[in-house]
Amino acid sequence: MSASTLHDLIGVGFGPSNLALAIALQELSQSRGKAIDALFMDKQEHYRWHGDTLSSQSELQISFLKDLVSLRNPTSPYSFVNYLKHQGRLVDFINLGTFYPCRVEYNDYLGWVAEQFADQALYGEEVLRIEPELDNGVIHHLKLISRNAQGMERARRTRSVVISTGGSPKIPTIFAPFKDDSRVFHHSRYLTGMKNLGCGQGKPMRIAIIGSGQSAAEAFIDLNDSFPSVRAEMILRSSALKPADDSPFVNEIFAPAYTDLVFQQQPEDREKLIREYHNTNYSVVDLNLIERIYAVLYRQKITQRTRHAVRCRQQVDAAIATEQGIELTLRDLATQQRHTQRYDAVILATGYERQSHQALLAPLEGYLHGLEVDRNYRALASPALQAPVFLQGFCEATHGLSDTLLSVLPMRSEDIGRALYQALDTAIAHSETKVCALASA
């Protein structure tokens, strides 16, 4: 591939969002009679979706019908149902009687789809920044600077960009100094982190899980089921584990039509809508998992052998590393009393933040309107920036809670695909007009 190659589109990240976009672009190419030259770059060496969190107890929290394409095109060959048929498991899945596949299987489904777009994917390169190519003060093309595993940098040119890099682990300030301590790790590195601990060989360990959401609950159950020598303690600020509200009427906020409703509101009204339904996605746990955890603790009362604990209303005020373990100073939020407890390891199930697009777009900051987007997820820009930049998964404030979830992928990818075709048609027409004018001169 020549450094002078000009792509129509480069997608940064090849997770579910850009994978859904690849499908939508393929469909649109059939109706429009021309294909977009798209390249999708991902820093991982091979396709993997949350691969380091795929414990045996990890299950998808939305229906399999909300896959990459079915809400837009149920007859697509890239549907989850067609994946099951190809794997010879369709009847078996039906017999399960569930709408919710495990994450291991869903990861395999995504990989199966990704293999069919292998000619458009480039793995093992991390995009560092996106730079403008100025032409008489106007930016028609962008330059992406990436780095491979060997540390070599490479520049690639494109007419447009879609950024879909997902969330980055949120590390509480107290635990920032433990970046290089293998005894403290974010849940995003759960499987790797557990391999580095002695409990895999049966060594007795006391492990703290910081957090009150689905990830924390899944870690708790996996430690109970997979590591008999571990004493697991969930530490959470709230007064109880709270169930996610996935009742039918509430679930309508994840329907495509609701995105229009949210976007049409004034900023303060959008914020109210997001706050109102915060308990559908943040710091909540599936009810069946809560019931499993409660049952584990109840059986301990029967046997009078305390192995695990869920410690509510606890604030971590300090953390100190010693040779013997990680000492946490916990404050009871009800009584304000403090006590120190030593753990052999700490798992941070503290969520994710979505800011990676900011660093990527820093060279374009002077041309963008504070990373605001229009209805079709295109970043608002000054007239000088003609090359379109689209954002996936960074638009919750304008498009609603579904923006970071799988539910919206089929419709969002079509919105972006149509807007992208329109923008590229305009750009190519402008380029052809410019060439004709030069030829006439």
Image (spheres, grey):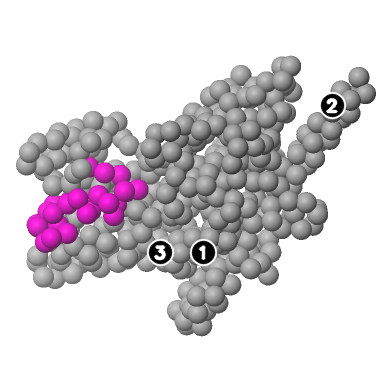
Distance in Å between CA atoms under marks 3 and 2: 51 Å
Q: Residue furthest left?
A: 324
Label 3 or label 2, whichever lies nearer to me, is: 2
| Among the two numbered marks 3 and 2 on one chain, the one whose residue lies closer to the N terminus | 3
At 84% across and 26% down in the image, what residue appears?
434
| Among the two numbered marks 1 and 3 on one chain, the one whose residue lies closer to the N terminus | 3
**Does 378 sit left or right of 198 as displayed?**
right
Label 2 or label 1, whichever lies nearer to me, is: 2
In this picture, which residue range is highlighted in magenta?
A: 184-207
Binning the other alpha carbons within 10 Å of mark 3 as few (below 14), some (14 to 19) or many (20 upward) gives some
- For label 2, the residue is 434
Examine the structure image and report whether residue 125 is included in the region drawn in magenta: no
**Does 186 sit left or right of 12 as displayed?**
left
Residue 70 makes an appearance in the image = yes
SS label for mark 3: helix
Residue 295 is marked as none
Percent across and percent down for residue 42 are 49, 45
Pick the residue in front: 221 or 269: 221
SS label for mark 1: helix
Query: Mark 1 is on which residue type?
Result: Trp
At 71% across and 28% down in the image, what residue appears?
140
Image quadrant where one finds the C terminus: top right
- For label 3, the residue is 104
User: In the picture, residue 416 is in which quadrant?
Assistant: top right
Query: Mark 2 is on which residue type?
Result: Lys
**Does 417 sit left or right of 252 as displayed?**
right
- For label 1, the residue is 112
